[in-house]
Image (cartoon, rainbow, N blue to C red):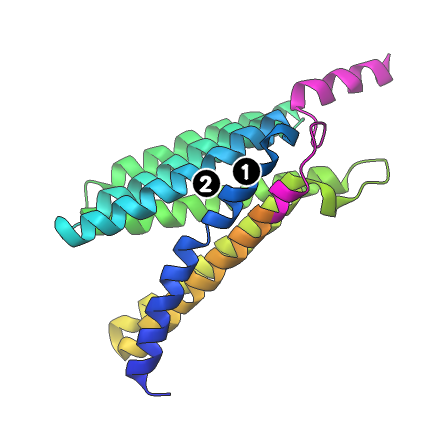
Amino acid sequence: MSLAQFHSCLGWLITFMQFSILVPMVVVWWRQQHFSPAVKMLSWYVYLSAFFALSARLSGIYLHNNLFFLIGFNVTKVLLFAAMYRLVLTGPRIRRVLAIATLVALGIVAASFALDTPRTVTVSRVVQCAVLAGFALAYLEQGLNRGVAYKFTHDPIWLLSVGQLIYSATTVSAFSVEFVTLFKGDIFNNISSLSFSIGGLAFNYFLTLAFLRAKPDVPAPAAVAAARGRLVAS
């Protein structure tokens, strides 16, 4: 396969990754009556993702600049996931850390506008990956510390967290490769796009699984879990 053919296939892969959000969207329409409060909040992600993907493509074609839509997607995703994880993380301390991390992330993105808009896109995406990876790890640790037998593969937020970690890892890897492109050429840029596309497809796969396996009482909201803890302690 020539470099030109690889670049063409990569373009189709990126388009396929963006349109793959339609799969979890259909599952949301089909199973939304089975969602817990946290998963209902998470379900808004499919609409936000579709809106920003379409807006970014149209603005790139007609306005020749889609940078603000890319920044908006990263910031909105952080805010939505922060609100969702706040419902399922039971420890008061980790919930305070979540709130502080969210505010710091937004502050970093706002401060990056002092540089230029393209750099703000990069900063917002890196911040999104770092903060949401932290939220995901906190939830995975909470699940591992449960004292009862639990099927993690049937916990939608557990599945989402695994998908987010894969997405964050591949996206950061893509950015690492992009630094090499400053010196080595287009081939590394293509590898970066390939890594980003695979990460996006993996995330949408786990997101779809999360919606497919969601039940009204899994996971319980943080307030309910805390109340149960107080009853056990008494």
Number of other residues with Cα within 10 Å of mark 2, as a class: few under 14, some 14 to 19, many 20 or more? some
Relative image position of residue 222 (x, y in whole percent): 66, 23
Q: Is residue 40 magenta?
A: no
**Residue 14 in view here:** yes
Residue labelled with disc 2: 46
Q: Earlier in the sequence, mark 2 or mark 1?
A: 1
Name the residue: 79% across, 18% down.
Answer: 228
Local secondary structure at mark 1: helix
Relative image position of residue 94 (x, y in whole percent): 60, 30
Main SS, magenta residues: helix
- Determine whether label 2 and label 1 are within 8 Å by CB: yes
Bounds of the magenta span?
Answer: 209-234
Query: Which quadrant holds residue 35?
Result: top right
Q: Quadrant of the N terminus?
A: bottom left
Relative image position of residue 155 (x, y in whole percent): 70, 40
Query: Which quadrant holds residue 85?
Result: top right
- Residue 94 shown left or right of residue 62 in the figure: right
Residue labelled with disc 1: 28
